[in-house]
Image (tube, rainbow, N blue to C red):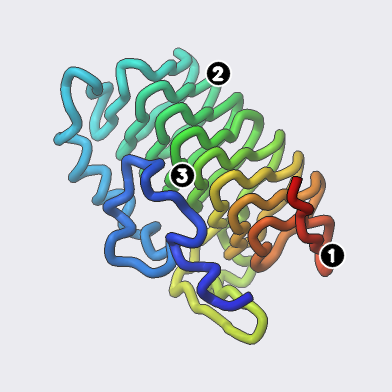
């Protein structure tokens, strides 16, 4: 495993997000995180009026999305068609929520991109992170986005050390990843496509594609069915 597994196209299907253009000039997906706010401000006014409505300052919501009255929405924000924002969701801004995605009860979002059909349905925190197509977080699973010493986040893949140049960076969760209940993804975690993380896990670093993360130092390859 080398740093190529961290490249955007190795982790994410860019056909499954309204935000594909934000990744045009980046190699690693986390390089898009500082661009989210301005990207939404540019894209929002161009969204078709027959499909989206503006519900406040810099907030664009698809007419087919279902948003609970008790949900808190703060811009800049785009909620795509058929998304579901449930009771007491807390969206702090700079968020793009993909088509058919689910943001659930007491889940908090901040500076993040949820690809189409991503699900964070129960008591999740998603900050400075990117969730791929059909990624799913179990109840209570969170992304921790700030190191205790406030230093810049780095990622190590074997002997390769990649600096993100970011102080706040939670996780990149690839397409079709399953994160077990009450797991914590430490700053700079990258969970590659089609992998599973056991419940109650403390994840740091990179989980290879098609893997089962049981605990630190114990990662098994999934057996093809």
Query: Does 51 appear above or below 91?
Result: above
Give me the C-alpha separation between circle 3 and circle 2: 17 Å
Q: Which mark is residue 59?
A: none
Q: Is residue 50 left or right of residue 159?
A: left
**Cα distance between the residues tagged 1 and 3:** 31 Å
Q: 10 Å neighbourhood of mark 1: few (<14), some, or many (≥20)?
A: few
User: For mark 2, what is the residue?
Assistant: 87
Relative to 58, residue 211 above or below: below
Q: Is residue 44 left or right of residue 68?
A: left
Whether residue 166 is visible, yes or no, is yes
Instruction: Residue 188 in the image: state x and y as whole percent.
Output: 58, 65
Q: Which part of the image, by quadrant, shows the C terminus?
A: top right
Q: Which residue is mark 1?
A: 218
**SS at badge 1:** strand
Q: Residues within 10 Å of mark 3 (few under 14, many from 20)?
A: some
Residue ID at (61%, 29%): 121
- Mark number for residue 110? 3
Circle 3 SS class: strand
Please report whichever mark, 3 or 2, sits nearer to the chain's N-terminal start: 2
* Number of numbered labels in the structure image: 3
Q: Write down the quadrant of residue 73 in the picture.
A: top left
For the point 43% across and 16% down, the residue is 66
Q: In the displayed orientation, state which residue is furthest to the bottom.
A: 159
Label located before the other in sequence (2 or 1): 2
Report x, y in % for residue 199: 80, 44
Q: Residue at x 25, y 49 (%)?
A: 39
Task: Give the mark nearer the N terminus: 1 vs 3.
Answer: 3
**Element type at marker 2?**
loop
Query: Mark 3 touching mark 2, by CB under 8 A?
Result: no
């Amino acid at each position: 495993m080398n740093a190529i597994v961290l490249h955007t196209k190795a982790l994410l299907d860019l056909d499954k997000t309204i935000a594909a253009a934000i990744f045009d000039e980046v190699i690693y997906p986390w390089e898009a995180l500082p661009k989210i706010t301005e990207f939404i401000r540019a894209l929002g006014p161009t969204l078709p009026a027959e499909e989206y409505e503006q519900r406040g300052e810099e907030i664009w919501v698809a007419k087919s999305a279902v948003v609970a009255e008790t949900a808190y929405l703060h811009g800049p924000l785009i909620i795509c068609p058929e998304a579901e924002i449930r009771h007491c969701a807390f969206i702090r801004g700079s968020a793009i929520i993909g088509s058919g995605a689910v943001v659930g009860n007491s889940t908090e979002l901040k500076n993040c991109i949820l690809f189409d059909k991503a699900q964070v349905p129960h008591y999740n925190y998603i900050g400075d992170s990117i969730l791929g197509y059909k990624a799913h977080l179990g109840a209570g699973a969170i992304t921790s986005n700030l190191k205790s010493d406030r230093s810049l986040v780095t990622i190590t893949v074997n002997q390769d050390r990649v600096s993100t140049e970011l102080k706040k960076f939670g996780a990149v969760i690839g397409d079709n990843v399953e994160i077990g209940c009450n797991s914590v993804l430490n700053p700079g975690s990258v969970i590659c496509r089609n992998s599973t993380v056991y419940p109650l896990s403390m994840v740091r670093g990179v989980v290879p594609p098609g893997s089962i993360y049981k605990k630190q130092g114990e990662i098994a390859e999934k057996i093809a069915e």
